[in-house]
Amino acid sequence: MSPDWDDREAALKPGALYLVTREVATPADQIPFRAGQILRLRKVHYSRYDSCHIYQFEAEFGAKSYWLHDDEPLESLKEVFVIQTAG
């Protein structure tokens, strides 16, 4: 488990809207994240089997997941998803 586990768990806020800043691959059964998409984060959970945090977003045609493995820097998540503020 990553030493910054708590930071990874709280890096994005469920219910908030996020702008995707660049295209990112997803698990094989999903369409990639596209730059310019705005998605709502549904939940974050940890997969001990895969050693990663999984960020699940609401997308136009169902759910999309972003996997942040323990050996990947937390900054890579924050570079792809930027929170959108009201107004």
Image: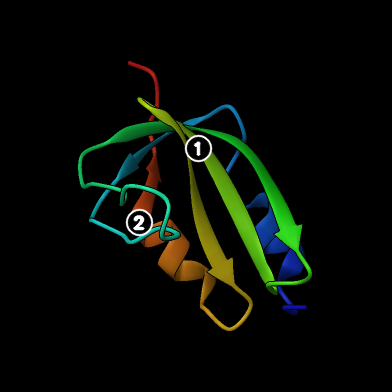
Q: Which amino acid does label 1 sit on?
A: Phe
Q: In this view, does 85 lie above or below 9?
A: above
- Outermost residue toward the front in this view: 29
Q: Residues within 10 Å of mark 1 (few under 14, many from 20)?
A: many
Residue at 30% x, 45% y: name it: 20
23 relative to 26 in the view: left or right? left
Name the quadrant of the N terminus. Answer: bottom right
Whole-percent x and y of residue 79?
A: 36, 60
- Can you tell which quarter of the image residue 42 is in? top right
Q: Residue 11 carries which label?
A: none
Local secondary structure at mark 2: helix
- CA gap between label 2 and label 1 equals 13 Å
Of all residues shown, which one is farthest toward the top? 87
Instruction: Residue 87 in the image: state x and y as whole percent.
Output: 32, 15
Mark 2, mark 1: which one is toward the viewer? Answer: 1
Q: Residue 37: which quarter of the image?
A: top left
Which of the labelled discs sits on residue 80, or is there none? 2
Looking at the picture, tell me which residue is in the foreground, 40 or 60: 60
Q: Which residue is label 1 attached to?
A: 57
Query: Is residue 22 rendered to the left or right of residue 81?
Result: left
Q: How is the image coloured?
A: rainbow
- The quadrant in which residue 83 appears is top left
Q: Residue at x 31, y 59 (%)?
A: 24
Q: Position of residue 5 (x, y in %)?
A: 74, 68
Q: Residue at x 58, y 27 (%)?
A: 15
Amino acid at dot 2: Val
Q: Residue at x 37, y 45 (%)?
A: 82
- Position above or below: 21 against 15: below
Considering only order in the chain, which callout, 1 or 2, is on the residue closer to the N terminus?
1
Q: Is mark 1 on a helix, strand or loop?
A: strand
The extreme bottom residue here reads 71
